[in-house]
Image (cartoon, rainbow, N blue to C red):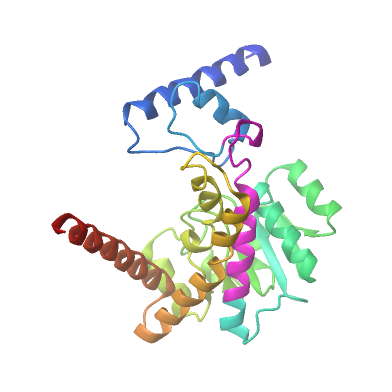
Amino acid sequence: MVPETARALGLALLRAFGRFVDTLGGRYITTEDVGMTPADLEFVAEETEHVVGLPLSMGGSGDTSEMTGLGVYLGMKAAGKAAWGGESLEGKVVALQGFGNVGFNTAGHLLAEGAKLIVTDTYEGALERAREMRATVVEPDAIYDVECDIFAPCALGGTLNADTIPRLRCSVVAGGANNQLATDADGDELDRRGILFAPDFVINAGGIINAANELDGVYRPERAREVTERIFETTSRVIATSREEGVPTYVAANRLAERRIESVRNLRGIYRRG
């Protein structure tokens, strides 16, 4: 397929996706994710208003990976404090599985604090960027076997499973990928092995926090950063709940989320009765 034809097809698909989102009438709001950019969302926005994460030039919040990287970094610090008694990551070895936008932005914070990086990715361009940051680069399958303090899944989901968990040589798992656990049993296995798991949907929430700040029509970057920085506190609360209730961290995170949702439902019920 010639480049011009491929591009035309890609833009048509983005607009078709926008039309589908619009049929949901605001029940679903879309934004960028793996392989998507704020520029792509411009074409989605031609078909629906239910889209966030638009370019800054359009009054949007821009690249969500910057805040995602910040949140993952803060989640690592919270997990580190629970695991080692101190939140400093200076001198800690972090194995980043995936060096796309989220991995790259997380790495910037880690290097600024003096952490050491081991990186893998399936794209040579990403690895070249990692080398420029003086990270050690390994083959994709070898990342599970490296000795590190933090293993950070920052690619696609399901990488923590029955085959890979026995190979991990870390104290903490904390990364930006979605759905890192292949099954709930894998979260139980991490807990059994004494590996502290920072639940993915807790520490990678910075991007959606950033995009959500568009919803009232005015993007406020300082507000987005302030809320994202609370990920440290939220991660600490999840770990504390895990220890208090004697459950794995992924269970504790789900319980806290369910309790928060229930409290909002109760408040709505009070307002309706009032």
Q: Tell me what residue is drawn at x 59 percent, y 46 percent.
A: 64
Question: In the displayed structure, does residue 205 sit left or right of residue 188?
Answer: right
Question: In the displayed structure, does residue 273 sit left or right of residue 144?
Answer: left
Q: Residue 119 in the image: x percent, y percent?
A: 72, 58
The quarter holding residue 249 reads bottom left
Q: Is residue 225 visible?
A: yes
Is 72 included in the stretch rendered in magenta? yes
- The residue sitting at the left extreme is 273
Q: Is residue 171 visible?
A: no
Q: Is residue 42 above or below residue 270?
A: above
Identify the image quadrant of the N terminus: top right
Q: Is residue 21 above or below residue 143?
A: above
Main SS of residues in magenta:
helix
The quarter holding residue 204 reads bottom right
Q: Tell me what residue is drawn at x 59 percent, y 64 percent.
A: 229
Q: Nearer the viewer, residue 177 or 259?
A: 259
Q: How many marks?
A: 0
Identify the image quadrant of the C terminus: bottom left
Q: Nearer the viewer, residue 166 or 158?
A: 158
Question: In the displayed structure, does residue 147 sit left or right of residue 43?
Answer: right
Q: Tell me what residue is drawn at x 46 percent, y 55 percent.
A: 179
Q: Residue 45 in the image: x percent, y percent?
A: 50, 26
Is 149 included in the stretch rendered in magenta? no
Q: Which residues are the magenta region?
A: 54-78
Q: Is residue 7 above or below residue 157?
A: above
Q: Residue 89 in the image: x percent, y percent?
A: 71, 75
Q: Residue 14 in the image: x percent, y percent?
A: 50, 24
Q: Tell me what residue is drawn at x 72 percent, y 59 percent.
A: 107
